[in-house]
């Protein structure tokens, strides 16, 4: 009973996540990569992403706090973040990153700060969602159920 | 002479002109105007000279004519004078003779033998001897003392001549009326006279002044003496009197004048009538009308006396000839002149005018020529200027084209990338469709721009061909798969045949070779609605020597049976021999022995090319007609590029086409034979492992032997032994026989064409087989060979019917070994388990399984994801987080089979890392090659070249080009797509497996 409930919650959650485009098909591909040989693959990747992203976001806010902003450095950070988010399938983070980079090219400090806030926002959104998702997965597995496959 | 002079002058003119022109060409084009003027001056000088020459000709000819006239006059005059003189002399001699006669017979005889009667008779009878005298008379010398006696003796008085000598003489002149002569010392009365002058008898000749002088001179000199001209008595003509003295016989020899006077006894006189004399003379001459003759006595040179002549004023020059009448005291002259004015010297006028006209004409011609030359030179200069401008424009055009195409490509890649991204977002079906259409159009545009760029590159000679090993069959299979959708959609047969004699590996430019074939096949597909497209590849030598018709496929298909021709689809095709009959390669033997001359023909049964368009088919942007592009699309640049590429490959392209029947394009290309199994050979599709099907036996059932041959050809490439049955009976018996046999004769598969003997007949074939079984000709449990249907298109109902009909599976044409292999594997259950699973993932898995792959990315997440993706396909993945780390790990010898490299990395980006890795490898390779290091030191690998694939989110062409430039082999876009990894990885690892197998 509990398993079925968990499973339904899982399905609902993934549905909303994909509907809101917090994650995209890339994430489903990642999920497909996870099999017997690498059971923790998603978890590993996601936590890597969190580490990386938080580090980058820190760097970014530091860089943008400076009197004279090194836009090249900022751009490099954003590019990394974009790459990471694209790999994990965090669509909205990636999209903001693209806009962010164009701001960097224009050397638009205000725009950059604005975009940094957006990226932060999006990041925390995806982070919370992913954490929820992973937690649910764990619970399902712990209670002996199987993770429902996404269409 | 003149002409000669002119000629040489002209030639000099020409020569100088030539030099002028050459100078112009080389040095000073702006000077030609001056040169032209100079030439014109020369010409005018020449013309002037010519005119002067003609005037000179006139003058000299005229002078010549005048001189001749004068000479003629002189000759005529002299002739007349001489004749006159001669005649006169004759007469004079006769008179002299008469004087001797008188002396002899009158004075020498006593009594005298002559009296008046005798004298008159004699003289009258001898008058013809003296044609010029009108009379002779003899006067006796009578002294005054003898007068009385004389007068008494003769019975008449001596009379005196009239005093007024010159007065006109009356007609009734009679001597009787004359007065008797007055007393004088001496008398000379006439005693004898000729009848014509009988009137002067008894007249004293001494009484006439002239006669007296004459007589005195005559007797003193002893010669004939002439009087000056005077009017003769009675006849009233101007005349002269010739007088001879008659001496008595005892005149001493060499007498003095006194002795002569003493001895004189009488005088003989003869009167000459000069006018009649001359008249008579002139009558004898023919041309008396042309000249006027006057005779003068010029004894008194101040007052010449005219003896003969009219007062007509003759014209022109007078010629004077002297006439000697034998009297030294008297001088006579003959004056001759022409009667008429000299005629105009027509010959001189015409000649000189002619010369002048010729000179002017020649001058005009030269003038016109000069003008023309000047004009041509001007035009030439203008043309050259235009040419320079045109060339500049052409260069500018090419540059412009190259620049613009490049400039368009950059934003277009942005557009395409964005479209790709747009398509990655959630779109509804319509939006997706729009985006896809936009992307397709964009790709088409890029393709077109690439073509234009190619054309520009070829035109400017900047296109260079690669020389890498490649597999012709692989290229052709690839082209075929490119068009398989279209051909299946249209329901046309598309097939390829590569002769067995074509080597597996050639060295050349596979990309460009493929481009040519793609172009030709693309055209054929575009213009063919039904029938077939058949690509065949042979060696030129093979085709050349195939006059023995040993090869079924090369053999031409004129031996059609019934309505259908022996072609791939049964449609009539053009005679393809004609498409290459003009090729150089066929006419001359090829020299290089290691060169492989391929002949590729693409034959279709399309609409054909209209006759009038065939000549410009290889001109860029020329389609058969403008409506073509509306109907079929395209720019018409493809064939032009193909032609250029074929030229670059040292080959020729040709075609033969008949509207309504089809076209066949042929081209030759020269390649080098390559060694098998070169590691870095590029492939698009992996060759299916041949060993899977080795030794199997198949039967191709097809009514059309051409098609059957091709099917057989492809199956043989897989190592399958194939028989062909052209009709159902032999096919059935073949199958039965094979079923009853076991072991070697066993049949593994039967391939039946859907249209083996006409529409749908292939589908019905298993039914025949089933009937056979029911009839008990075959044991029911006998394991039948698997049946396959070959089809170009299948409707859904037909697909449903397949299984029930007894077919295991279908193979969609065009046939390709890879596809046949996949199908056979599935049906026959051969090969590894993985290979039996469907899809590219499996193929990829088979490729990557067990491979050592290095993933280089600074981004941990990306690294993880890439590693995960590759691991999924069985690869063993090692990660590196920077370019430097990668370089260290890839220092030969190493264990890696491939490297996926991120481009944008801090410190050292992917390009730089790749460059360093490549230079490392080159060093090692050189060491091995030069023998300084044995390959054992480097893991027994003779040639180090790790495939490096770029990982990039950038899909822009420029990035790709940069990748290739720095030594990368290919690129995959992030995030990974299965298909892309497959296509990128396939051609490295396929050759890799072959390496490891061999």
Image: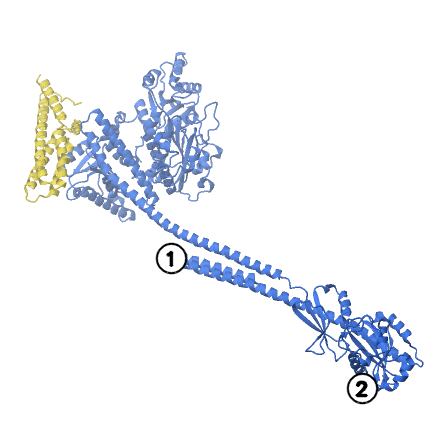
Q: Residue A46: where, in percent of width, then height?
A: 11, 31
Point out which mark residue A41 bears.
none
Q: Residue B907: where, in percent of width, then height?
A: 15, 44
Which residue does the image show at 38% across and 25% down from the upper left?
B697
Residue hosting label 1: B30
Q: Mark 1: which secondary structure?
A: helix
- In the rendered structure, the colour chosen for chain A is yellow
Chain of the residue on which disc 2 is drawn: B
Q: Quadrant of residue B208?
A: bottom right
Distance Cα–Cα, label 2 vs label 1: 103 Å
Left or right: B565 in relation to B290? left
Which residue does the image show at 69% across and 72% down from the upper left?
B320
Q: Name the residue at the top extreme.
A: B775
Residue B850 appears in the rendering = yes
Q: Mark 2: which secondary structure?
A: helix
B693, A61: nearer the viewer: A61
Q: Quadrant of residue B757?
A: top left
**Circles 2 and 1 on the same subunit:** yes
Left or right: B233 in relation to B844? right
State the colouring used for the structure image: by chain
Q: Quadrant of the N terminus of chain A?
A: top left
Q: Residue B725: where, in percent of width, then height?
A: 43, 22
B737, B126: nearer the viewer: B126
Point out which mark residue B257 bears.
2
Q: Residue B484: where, in percent of width, then height?
A: 33, 28
Q: Quadrant of the C terminus of chain A?
A: top left
Colour-to-chain, blue? B
């Amino acid at each position: 009973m509990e398993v079925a409930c968990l499973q339904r919650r899982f399905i609902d959650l993934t549905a909303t996540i994909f509907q809101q485009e917090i994650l995209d098909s890339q994430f489903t591909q990642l999920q497909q990569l996870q099999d017997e040989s690498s059971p923790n693959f998603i978890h590993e990747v996601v936590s890597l992403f969190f580490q990386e992203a938080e580090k980058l976001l820190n760097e970014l806010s530091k860089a943008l706090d400076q009197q004279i902003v090194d836009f090249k450095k900022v751009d490099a950070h954003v590019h990394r973040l974009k790459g990471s988010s694209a790999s994990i399938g965090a669509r909205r983070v990636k999209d903001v990153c693209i806009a962010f980079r164009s701001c960097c090219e224009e050397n638009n400090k205000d725009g950059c700060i604005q975009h940094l806030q957006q990226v932060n926002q999006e990041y925390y959104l995806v982070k919370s969602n992913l954490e929820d998702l992973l937690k649910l997965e764990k619970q399902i597995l712990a209670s002996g159920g199987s993770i429902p496959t996404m269409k | 002479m003149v002409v000669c002079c002119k000629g040489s002058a002209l030639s000099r003119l020409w020569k100088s002109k030539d030099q002028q022109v050459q100078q112009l060409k080389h040095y000073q084009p702006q000077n030609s105007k001056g040169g032209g003027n100079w030439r014109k001056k020369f010409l005018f000088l020449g013309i002037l000279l010519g005119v002067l020459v003609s005037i000179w000709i006139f003058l000299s000819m005229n002078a010549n004519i005048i001189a001749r006239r004068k000479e003629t006059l002189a000759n005529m005059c002299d002739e007349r004078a001489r004749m006159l003189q001669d005649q006169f002399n004759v007469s004079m001699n006769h008179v002299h003779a008469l004087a001797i006669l008188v002396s002899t017979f009158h004075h020498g005889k006593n009594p005298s033998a002559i009296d008046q009667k005798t004298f008159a008779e004699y003289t009258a009878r001898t008058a013809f001897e003296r044609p010029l005298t009108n009379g002779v008379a003899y006067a006796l010398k009578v002294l005054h003392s003898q007068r009385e006696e004389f007068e008494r003796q003769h019975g008449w008085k001596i009379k005196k001549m009239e005093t007024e000598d010159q007065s006109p003489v009356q007609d009734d002149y009679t001597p009787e009326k004359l007065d008797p002569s007055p007393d004088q010392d001496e008398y000379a009365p006439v005693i004898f006279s000729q009848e014509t002058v009988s009137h002067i008898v008894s007249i004293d000749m001494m009484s006439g002044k002239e006669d007296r002088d004459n007589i005195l001179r005559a007797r003193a000199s002893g010669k004939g003496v002439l009087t000056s001209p005077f009017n003769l008595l009675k006849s009233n003509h101007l005349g002269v009197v010739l007088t001879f003295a008659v001496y008595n016989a005892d005149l001493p020899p060499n007498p003095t004048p006194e002795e002569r006077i003493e001895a004189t006894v009488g005088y003989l006189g003869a009167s000459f009538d000069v006018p009649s004399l001359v008249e008579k003379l002139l009558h004898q001459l023919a041309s008396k009308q042309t000249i006027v003759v006057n005779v003068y006595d010029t004894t008194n040179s101040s007052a010449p006396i005219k003896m003969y002549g009219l007062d007509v004023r003759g014209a022109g020059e007078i010629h004077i000839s002297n006439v000697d009448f034998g009297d030294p005291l008297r001088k006579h002259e003959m004056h001759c002149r022409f009667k008429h004015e000299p005629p105009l010297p027509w010959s001189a006028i015409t000649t000189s005018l002619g010369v002048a006209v010729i000179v002017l004409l020649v001058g005009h011609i030269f003038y016109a020529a000069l003008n023309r030359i000047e004009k041509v030179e001007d035009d030439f200069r203008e043309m050259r200027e235009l040419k320079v401008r045109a060339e500049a424009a052409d260069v500018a055009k090419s540059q412009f084209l190259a620049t613009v195409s490049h400039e368009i490509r950059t934003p277009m890649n942005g557009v395409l990338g964005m479209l790709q991204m747009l398509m990655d977002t959630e779109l509804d079906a319509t939006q997706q469709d729009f985006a896809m259409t936009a992307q397709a159009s964009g790709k088409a545009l890029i393709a077109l721009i690439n073509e234009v760029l190619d054309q520009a590159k070829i035109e400017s000679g900047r296109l260079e061909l690669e020389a890498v090993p490649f597999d012709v069959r692989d290229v052709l299979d690839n082209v075929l798969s490119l068009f398989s959708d279209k051909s299946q959609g249209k329901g046309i047969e598309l097939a390829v045949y590569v002769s067995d004699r074509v080597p597996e590996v050639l060295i050349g430019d596979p990309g460009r070779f493929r481009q040519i074939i793609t172009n030709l096949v693309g055209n054929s597909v575009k213009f063919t609605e039904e029938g077939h497209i058949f690509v065949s590849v042979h060696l030129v030598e093979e085709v050349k020597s195939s006059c023995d018709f040993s090869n079924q496929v090369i053999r031409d298909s004129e031996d059609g049976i019934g309505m259908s021709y022996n072609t791939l689809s049964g449609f009539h095709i053009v005679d393809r021999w004609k498409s290459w009959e003009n090729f150089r390669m066929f006419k001359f033997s090829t020299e290089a022995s290691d060169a492989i001359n391929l002949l590729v023909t693409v034959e279709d049964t399309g609409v054909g090319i209209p006759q009038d368009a065939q000549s410009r088919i290889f001109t860029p942007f020329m389609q058969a007609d403008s409506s073509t592009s509306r109907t079929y699309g395209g720019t018409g640049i493809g064939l032009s590029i193909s032609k250029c590429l074929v030229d670059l490959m040292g080959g020729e392209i040709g075609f033969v086409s008949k509207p309504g029947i089809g076209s066949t394009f042929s081209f030759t290309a020269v390649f080098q034979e390559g060694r098998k199994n070169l590691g870095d050979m590029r492939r698009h599709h992996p060759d299916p492992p041949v060993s899977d099907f080795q030794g199997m036996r198949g039967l191709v059932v097809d009514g059309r032997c051409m098609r059957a041959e091709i099917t057989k050809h492809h199956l043989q490439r897989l190592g399958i032994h194939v028989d062909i049955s052209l009709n159902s009976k032999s096919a059935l018996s073949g199958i039965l026989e094979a079923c009853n046999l076991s072991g070697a004769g066993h049949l593994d598969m039967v391939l039946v064409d859907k249209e083996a003997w006409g529409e749908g007949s292939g589908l019905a074939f298993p039914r025949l087989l089933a009937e056979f079984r029911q009839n008990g000709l075959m044991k029911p449990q006998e394991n039948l060979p698997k049946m396959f249907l070959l089809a170009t298109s299948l409707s859904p109902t037909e697909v449903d019917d397949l299984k029930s009909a007894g077919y295991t599976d279908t193979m969609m044409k065009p046939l390709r070994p890879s596809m046949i292999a996949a199908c056979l594997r599935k049906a026959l259950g051969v090969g590894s388990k993985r290979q039996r699973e469907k899809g590219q993932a499996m193929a990829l898995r088979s490729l990557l399984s067990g491979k050592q792959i290095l993933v280089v990315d600074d981004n941990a997440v990306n690294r993880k994801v890439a590693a995960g993706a590759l691991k999924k396909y069985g690869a063993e993945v090692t990660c590196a987080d920077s370019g430097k780390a990668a370089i260290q790990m890839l220092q030969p010898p190493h264990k890696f089979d491939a490297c996926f490299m991120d481009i944008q990395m801090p410190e050292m980006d992917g390009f730089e890392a790749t460059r360093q890795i490549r230079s490392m490898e080159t060093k090692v390779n050189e060491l091995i090659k030069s023998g300084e290091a044995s390959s054992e030191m480097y893991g027994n690998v003779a040639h180090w070249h790790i495939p490096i694939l770029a990982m990039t989110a950038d899909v822009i062409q420029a990035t790709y080009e940069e990748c290739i430039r720095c030594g990368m082999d290919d690129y995959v876009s992030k995030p990974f797509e299965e298909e892309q990894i497959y296509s990128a990885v396939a051609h490295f690892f396929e050759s890799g497996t072959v390496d490891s197998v061999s």
